[in-house]
């Protein structure tokens, strides 16, 4: 990610977020400095050197944990698109805004969708300007018939099934197909903010992998190892929490949890409250970034 830091709203903490935001999702921010910080380093000012120390420390933290990138993202919804041309603005904004809801998602390139693409998903969203190819249509409708949900607009084209009774939505017509449902936008998609937030409601909060209390402005990325017995929950705190601690509920049969932060070299044990099909984690106050390593 090549992004030059921009003033005036630039703080020391912004550099740590720049590193962590990209690294948590498997990428890397190309480290670049604003002119004021670069001048401070050249002059060896203590405040600038301290920012540099934290910045390189954060980069080193992620470099020493490359194994985390082998984990597979947990997901509730799949976003299907080519994410380019006439589809670029709408679908990329949907990705941005779904991420802000903290509903875990999976990117599905529409020319590379296979049966395994739908594993663990509750729903898929198709917002492209063009109708799907016959093969993609067949795969998605097979997913719906087995109990999934398709969220789409009129450009999808004709749909089998029948109108759902007893359910209403202000912006969608609901249909039943096999064991699953189809939600067709009426009218077509216009506001990606509404698309992202409506998707959360259409799928239902009961299927969320993560729930937060006292989190504030927070982003998350939840990944699992191939056998599902270990998971990494990475948290990005874009603003100081107004409360002293945060609680997060994570779906899964985990029993232990360790907390990693950028300011401490060793992990800390986390209080784990076991529930029927999830765990509730009570975290101490953290800033910018934290990772919780969970084990069954």
Image (cartoon, rainbow, N blue to C red):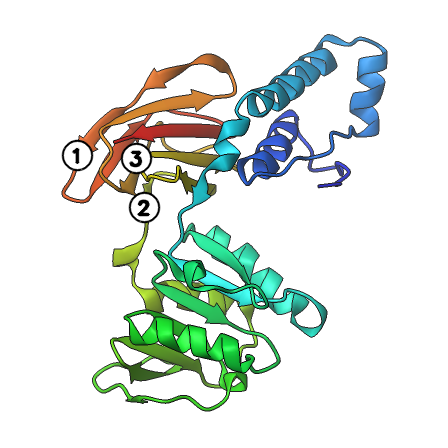
Q: CA distance from mark 2 to mark 3?
A: 20 Å
Label ID, residue 274: 1
User: Disc 1 or 2, which lies upstream in sequence?
Assistant: 2
Out of 186 and 279, give the one closest to the viewer. 279
Q: Is residue 228 left or right of residue 48?
A: left
- Callout 1 environment at 10 Å: few (<14), some (14 to 19), or many (20+)? some
- Callout 2 environment at 10 Å: few (<14), some (14 to 19), or many (20+)? some
Mark in the foreground, 3 or 1: 3
Mark 1 residue element: strand
- Callout 3 environment at 10 Å: few (<14), some (14 to 19), or many (20+)? few
Residue labelled with disc 3: 229
1 and 2 marks in contact (CB < 8 Å): no
Vertical arrangement, residue 293 with respect to residue 56, above or below? below
Seen at 48% across and 27% down, the residue is 287
Q: Quadrant of the C terminus?
A: top left
Seen at 50% across and 88% down, the residue is 157
Mark in the foreground, 2 or 3: 3
Label ID, residue 211: 2
User: Disc 2 or 3, which lies upstream in sequence?
Assistant: 2
């Amino acid at each position: 990610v090549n992004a030059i830091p921009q003033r005036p709203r630039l703080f020391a903490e912004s550099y740590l977020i720049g590193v962590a935001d990209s690294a948590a999702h498997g990428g890397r921010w190309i480290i670049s400095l604003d002119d004021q910080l670069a001048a401070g380093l050249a002059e060896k000012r203590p405040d600038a050197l301290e920012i540099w120390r934290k910045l390189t420390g954060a980069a080193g933290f992620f470099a020493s944990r490359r194994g985390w990138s082998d984990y597979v993202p947990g997901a509730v919804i799949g976003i299907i698109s080519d994410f380019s041309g006439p589809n670029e603005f709408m679908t990329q904004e949907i990705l941005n805004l779904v991420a802000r809801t903290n509903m875990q998602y999976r990117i599905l390139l529409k020319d590379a969708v296979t049966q395994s693409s739908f594993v663990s998903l509750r729903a898929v969203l198709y917002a492209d300007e063009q109708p799907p190819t016959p093969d993609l249509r067949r795969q998605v409708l097979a997913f719906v018939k087995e109990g999934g949900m398709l969220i789409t607009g009129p450009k999808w084209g004709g749909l089998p099934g029948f109108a759902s009774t007893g359910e209403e939505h202000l912006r969608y017509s609901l249909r039943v197909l096999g064991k699953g449902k189809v939600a067709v936008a009426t009218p077509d998609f216009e506001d990606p903010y509404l698309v992202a937030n409506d998707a959360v409601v259409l799928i239902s909060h009961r299927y969320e992998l993560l729930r937060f209390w006292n989190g504030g402005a927070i982003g998350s990325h939840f990944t699992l190892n191939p056998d599902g017995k270990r998971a990494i929950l990475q948290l990005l705190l874009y603003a100081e929490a107004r409360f002293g601690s945060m609680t997060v509920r994570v779906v899964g049969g985990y029993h232990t949890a360790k907390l990693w932060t950028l300011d401490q070299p060793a992990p800390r044990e986390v209080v784990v409250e076991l529930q029927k099909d999830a765990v509730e984690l009570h975290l101490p106050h953290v800033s910018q970034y934290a990772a919780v390593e969970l084990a069954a």
